[in-house]
Amino acid sequence: MATSRSSSSQALSVSSSDSTPATSQPPASPPKQRRRRRIYRPKKNSLYDLFHQHAGTSLFLRPICWVDLHAQLLGAQWEELPTCDTPKPTTIPGSPPSQGHMKPSATIITLSDSLTQILLPDPMHPILCTNAIKTILATLWPEPFGKPQYVPELHLYFGGRVYRDSVRAQIMWNFPSDGTKSSYSSFRSVSTRPADSFNPSTLPSTPSPTPASLPMMCYIGKSQLATIRRNLFRVAPGPGRSWNEPVSRLQQLRQRQLVPANTDQDAYFVGIFLAMAQKHYYPAPHASLRRDSPINPKGGIPPSPNFQDITLRILTHDTDTSDFIVYTGYITKAFLEKFHNPFDASPNDDDAAESGIRIEYARVPIWPILGLRERLGKALGHDVVGQFDVDHIETWEKDPENKETSKRKREVLPEVLSGSYEEDSDDEPALSAKKRCLSEGSPLGVAGFS
């Protein structure tokens, strides 16, 4: 009886164990395989290939921190042209002084004051220097330099990303529209890029940039550039907010490393030319608080714009020698493509100089004022200032007539003609007295006029 009970209990337990599912953890899922990131091998002499060749050197920097090595690796070729020191006025011994010496016009006085201001030995405030340069160029060549842009902040485009406000200058002028002056042939030869020519499905469609929005020339003073570099690195305070002498010496060493061996061949000018040229082909980036962002919202490198060779200018001046220096940059299509796709390089490009940038620069003596317009015009070129007679020196003995003044003269002329001779004779003594007062007194001379 007991045996039957034990056997039945065993059978019950077995059946219950068979009917009840076993409580165990679910089977472990196989580990997910990591998506392998594709590694692109850059082509020889591409920008990324240069980074790999100089892995221990900081190269990916903003242009204000570029040194001579950057210009060398980017294939910058510098060429100094002969000094543009003609024409100058010829003085014959025994000849009387010109009218500009005896009674200088307001234009001559304005030019003399502005030129003297930028040549002061002590560095002046950037705003004052910028205004003086604007006055000088607007007086010499009012049509191409009449509408400047103050303190331009230009972006740099590199490998599908835009780096905002990477390049700054003191003042910039744009190419004038074709209707303003028909002799500006350089603008019509520049190929511009519509803002929506990347990919209409990924970038917003915006109107094409107007001719007045394309950079032509900018100015930055050598003294201003040296001041920026001196104040570029911050010195953190020491314990108790004391002066941190070790960090100060370290930052001074970094500042000295940024000074070019030849101040006429500054690597920052290469960055300015690059940023000015890129503005011709890239649309304005979207508003963002970030210093850099992708050009294409979906990421990646967008299709290459229709780059073309382009010629731009930079103007600066040397206080020590009293010279203007005009830089003419010939930016090639291959140079712009290098920055658009830093993995790629031009075919058969065994030397970086083949796809680099060529920069010519010429000095223009500031004094004498007579002939400065023609000397500077020769250095800038006819494609910037238009056609002019190099042998005809502008004397500015008479100020240009204002349109409003001439309009008032035309309105007053009928009244004068309709008046009686008796009224004119009554006012004549007073007028002759005024002429005598103006003719008396010491003549005013202008320094550096001739």
Image: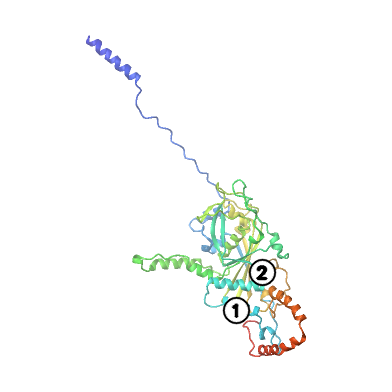
Residue 210 screen position, x and y as percent: 66, 58
Which residue is depicted at the point 27% across and 12% down? 7
Density class for disc 2 (Cα within 10 Å; few <14, some 14-19, many ≥20) is many
371 or 153, nearer to the observer: 153
Give the residue type at disc 2. Leu
Quadrant showing the N terminus: top left
What colouring does the structure picture have? rainbow
Q: Residue furthest top?
A: 1
36, 182: nearer the viewer: 182
Mark 2 vs 1, N-terminal side: 1
Q: In the figure, is residue 230 to the left or right of 46?
A: left
Question: For residue 94, what is the image quadrant?
Answer: bottom right
x, y (%) of residue 397? 69, 81
Amino acid type of disc 1?
Asp
**The quarter of the displayed image where residue 28 is located:** top left
Question: How many marks overall?
Answer: 2
Q: Which mark is residue 380?
A: 2
Judging by the rendered image, the residue that carries numbered circle 1 is 113
State which quarter of the image contains the C terminus: bottom right
Q: How far across and down, in percent of the image, does residue 177 sit?
A: 69, 62
From mark 2 to mark 1, how far is it between C-alphas?
Answer: 23 Å
Residue drawn at point x = 35 percent, y = 19 percent: 19
Closest to the observer: 33 or 126?
126
Q: Position of residue 101 (x, y in %)?
A: 66, 85
Instruction: From the viewer's perspective, tell me whether residue 191 is left or right of residue 262.
Output: right
> In front of the other: label 2 or label 1?
1
